């Protein structure tokens, strides 16, 4: 049994790839365009022509595809074999072999694997590094793949203190339950995450608007798949925005854009630029 499969069987890891597999049915040119727009906005770049792009923990592969459509040469990898299969399926459907998109199975914690990939103009790891079980090592190794003058784009769960510890208990309970009983955790969690919003929108005579518009405001993603991902997502680590900025600064990275969640849950988003080496 592989390390990934063993972690799943012990309830130590969520099956992200299985969740992404269900998302694939929703991917169409409209969602790809939204992902492309989101990625372009994050990098403040109209295109990525001539750039090497590494998607560390590619999940569904949607943002690898977006980078490809923006003109980059893309290398994607994921620790979850099912996520690798998702990315391969998106490549088959929307890009094809020989498109400049390479997909591998591997871990961001595997230093020799990463070193063999080389360096990149952009290293992108959105909502991944906090699921490794070794957050700061993962940040360090991902940052090490950024070439001089390149960009590091990461999103890391916000540290909410005691609230984050309660969510860790929820996630642990979800993964330890038999699959048929996991709804006992998902349903009440869904009520906590979306109930207040539904209530407010109903009072304002716009019931369900945020749910319907989610794909246009959330990087082209699916609200239900994101709920399941959030509730089940183990391993689970968090960090304060200032911790992430300070950690990356010590490694020669300057923050170009920081978007935080305040006191809320979810990911703080960071775009860093690596200093160019002196000639």
Image (tube, rainbow, N blue to C red):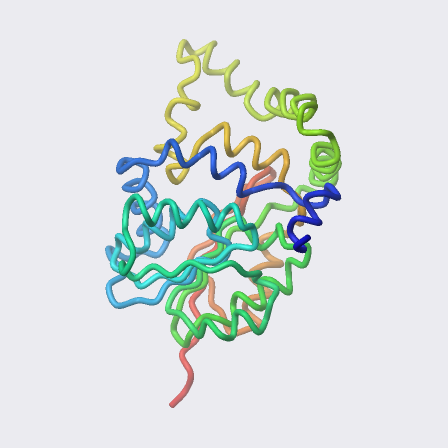
Q: Is residue 80 left or right of residue 122?
A: right
Image coords of residue 145 (percent x, y): 48, 71
Residue 66, above or below 218: below
Quarter of the rendering containing residue 8: top right
Above-or-below relation of 6 to 109: above
Q: Residue at x 31, y 42 (%)?
A: 32
- Pinpoint residue 103: horizontal percent, then vertical percent: 42, 58
234 lies left or right of 149: right
Residue placed most toward the observer, 70 or 275:
70
Q: In which quarter of the image is residue 181?
A: top right
Q: Is residue 70 above or below residue 168?
A: below
The spot of residue 273 in percent (x, y) is: 42, 67
**Residue at image coords 34%, 33%:** 216
Measuring 37% from the left and 26% from the top, which residue is drawn there? 213
Where residue 63 appears, as percent x and y from the top left, is 38, 49
Of residue 3 and residue 31, the one placed in the foreground of this image is 3
Asked whether 250 or 81 is in front, the reply is 81
Looking at the rendered image, the quarter that the C terminus falls into is bottom left
Number of residue marks: 0
Residue at the far front in the pictured view = 1
Q: Quadrant of residue 191?
A: top right
């Amino acid at each position: 049994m592989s390390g990934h499969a063993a972690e799943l069987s012990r309830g130590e890891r969520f099956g992200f790839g299985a969740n992404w597999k269900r998302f694939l049915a929703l991917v169409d040119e409209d969602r790809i365009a939204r992902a492309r727009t989101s990625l372009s906005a994050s990098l403040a770049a109209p295109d990525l022509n001539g750039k090497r792009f590494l998607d560390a923990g590619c999940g569904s592969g949607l943002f690898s595809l977006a980078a490809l459509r923006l003109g980059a040469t893309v290398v994607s990898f994921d620790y979850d074999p099912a996520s690798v299969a998702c990315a391969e399926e998106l490549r088959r459907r929307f890009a094809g072999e020989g498109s400049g998109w390479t997909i591998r199975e591997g871990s961001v914690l595997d230093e020799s694997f990463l070193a063999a990939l080389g360096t990149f103009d952009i290293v992108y790891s959105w909502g991944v590094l906090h699921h490794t079980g070794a957050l700061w090592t993962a940040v360090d190794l991902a940052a090490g793949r950024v070439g001089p003058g390149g960009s590091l784009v990461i999103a890391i769960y916000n540290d909410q203190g005691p609230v984050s510890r309660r969510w860790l208990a929820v996630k642990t309970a979800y993964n330890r339950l038999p699959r048929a009983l996991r709804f006992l955790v998902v349903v009440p969690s869904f009520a906590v995450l979306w109930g207040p919003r539904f209530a407010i929108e109903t009072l304002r005579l716009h019931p369900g608007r945020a749910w319907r518009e989610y794909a246009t405001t959330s990087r082209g993603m699916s609200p239900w798949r994101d709920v399941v991902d959030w509730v089940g997502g183990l391993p689970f680590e968090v960090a304060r925005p200032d911790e992430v900025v300070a950690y990356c600064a010590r490694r020669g990275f300057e923050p170009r854009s920081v978007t935080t969640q305040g006191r809320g849950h979810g990911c703080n988003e960071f775009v860093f630029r690596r200093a160019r080496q002196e000639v």
